[in-house]
Image: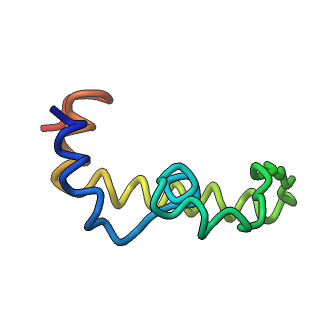
Amino acid sequence: MSKQIRDVIEPVIIRRNRLDLQNNPYYKNEVKDLSKVEPPIEWFFELTKEQSVFYDKYKAFEFEKYLKSGSGRAFAKKRLCSID
């Protein structure tokens, strides 16, 4: 069923990615000269002590703010401890 739905809406979808265009016979000749894109390279950065402290404080602040929201209270009640 999802294939049937896709076949109906595919011609009117505006946002397309490179692979969709290359695999679509209608567009295949128009996009054959697109540059090839390399897979992304993952970079790792080591934080300084000051950056790490700031990040940990920010995470703690955001988590505390979340716990005070309705969904945060439900999460805390279910996962952390009983809140009365």
The residue that appears at 59% across and 70% down in the rendered structure is 30
Can you say which quadrant of the picture contains the N terminus? top left
Q: Nearer the viewer, residue 83 or 74?
A: 74
The residue that appears at 71% across and 67% down in the rendered structure is 34
Q: Tell me if residue 62 comes above or below residue 80 in the rendering.
A: below
Q: Where does residue 40 sit, x and y in percent of width and height?
A: 76, 52
Q: Is residue 30 left or right of residue 42?
A: left
Q: Quadrant of residue 18?
A: bottom right
Q: Tell me if residue 4 comes above or below residue 47 in the rendering.
A: above
The residue that appears at 77% across and 59% down in the rendered structure is 36
Q: Nearer the viewer, residue 9 or 66?
A: 9
Q: Is residue 47 left or right of residue 7?
A: right
Q: Where does residue 69 sit, x and y in percent of width and height?
A: 22, 57
Q: Where does residue 47 sit, x and y in percent of width and height?
A: 83, 57
Q: Where does residue 6 sit, x and y in percent of width and height?
A: 25, 47
Q: Nearer the viewer, residue 32 or 10?
A: 32
The residue that appears at 62% across and 66% down in the rendered structure is 31
Q: Tell me if residue 83 comes above or below residue 79 in the rendering.
A: below
